[in-house]
Amino acid sequence: MASPRPSRGRLIRRRLRQRRACQFAVCLAAISLAVPALLAGSSNGSGTRQVTGVATAATHRHAAAPRPTATTTAPATTVASTATAAAAVSVPPTTEPPSARVDAVAWHPPTTTAPPVTAPPSTAPPTTPPPTAAAPAPARPAHSESGLASYYDDPNGGCAHKTLPFGTVVHITASNGRTATCVVDDRGPFGPGRILDLDTSIFARLAPLSAGLVSVTATW
């Protein structure tokens, strides 16, 4: 049995190694020739020129040497015809139960549709907002009296009334819209149509002193 031929890549790498070995041998030969000449001509200075000449000659000889060429011959191959190979190999037909084939092709998982979700009716009683409490009506005074008011110099800075107990707080509203407050500490006035006799400072809050009288409503 014949040994297999090396591939083209291996032949190329072998030729490269051989070429490098030849170059290395040439360099060694040039060095071996140049060293004695260098030693012999070191006294007269000609050794350098001799070494250069020997190395140049060795390089020219190596360049002139014929380079080997690698030739590769591919082995002959015999390809059998496709028809013959197909005839030689027979593949038995696959037998599968008909029920399995039908199930694999026609069966699909059933699709389910979720029923609509309906929220249950709310059983919570309807919420009724609480009634809003009406604002309390302003407290009406228990007693009121309308008439004229005069003034005098009250030493206590209060007012005089015919019947109200001393210490009663009286709220006075004049016909011009002005208001004042005083405390009953004396009796009077005794003129017709008058209901209060005010201290000078209190009367000045309701009307000018030059008016003398002012129409008022007293509440307590």
Image (spheres, grey):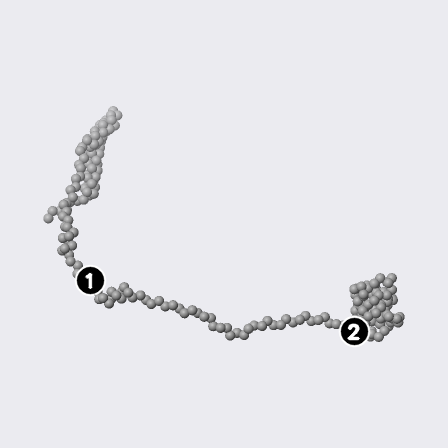
For label 2, the SS is loop
113 horizontally vs 106: left or right: right
142 horizontally vs 64: left or right: right
Type of amino acid under label 1: Thr
The residue most toward the top is 44
Looking at the rendering, which quadrant does residue 113 occupy?
A: bottom left
Q: Residue at (18%, 44%) from the top-left corner?
A: 7
Q: Residue at (72%, 70%) from the top-left corner?
A: 138
Of the pair 18 and 92, the residue shown nearer to us: 92
Mark 2 neighbour class, 10 Å CA radius: few under 14, some 14 to 19, many 20 or more: few
Q: Position of residue 211 (x, y in %)?
A: 86, 63
**Rendered position, 34 above or below 76:** above
Q: Residue at (33%, 67%) from the top-left corner?
A: 110
Label whose residue precedes the other's in the sequence (2 or 1): 1
Circle on res. 94: 1
Count every numbered label the image shows and give the total.
2
Q: Position of residue 188 (x, y in %)?
A: 87, 71
Of the pair 78 and 35, the residue shown nearer to us: 78
Looking at the rendering, which quadrant does residue 8 occupy?
A: top left
Q: Is residue 87 visible?
A: yes
Of the pair 17 and 218, the residue shown nearer to us: 218
Of the pair 62 and 101, the residue shown nearer to us: 101
Mark 2 to mark 1: distance in Å? 122 Å
Mark 1 neighbour class, 10 Å CA radius: few under 14, some 14 to 19, many 20 or more: few
**Rendered position, 125 above or below 6:** below
For label 1, the SS is loop
Q: Position of residue 33 (x, y in %)?
A: 20, 31
Per the image, the residue denoted by label 2 is 143
Q: Residue at (66%, 71%) from the top-left corner?
A: 134
Q: Is residue 43 visible?
A: no
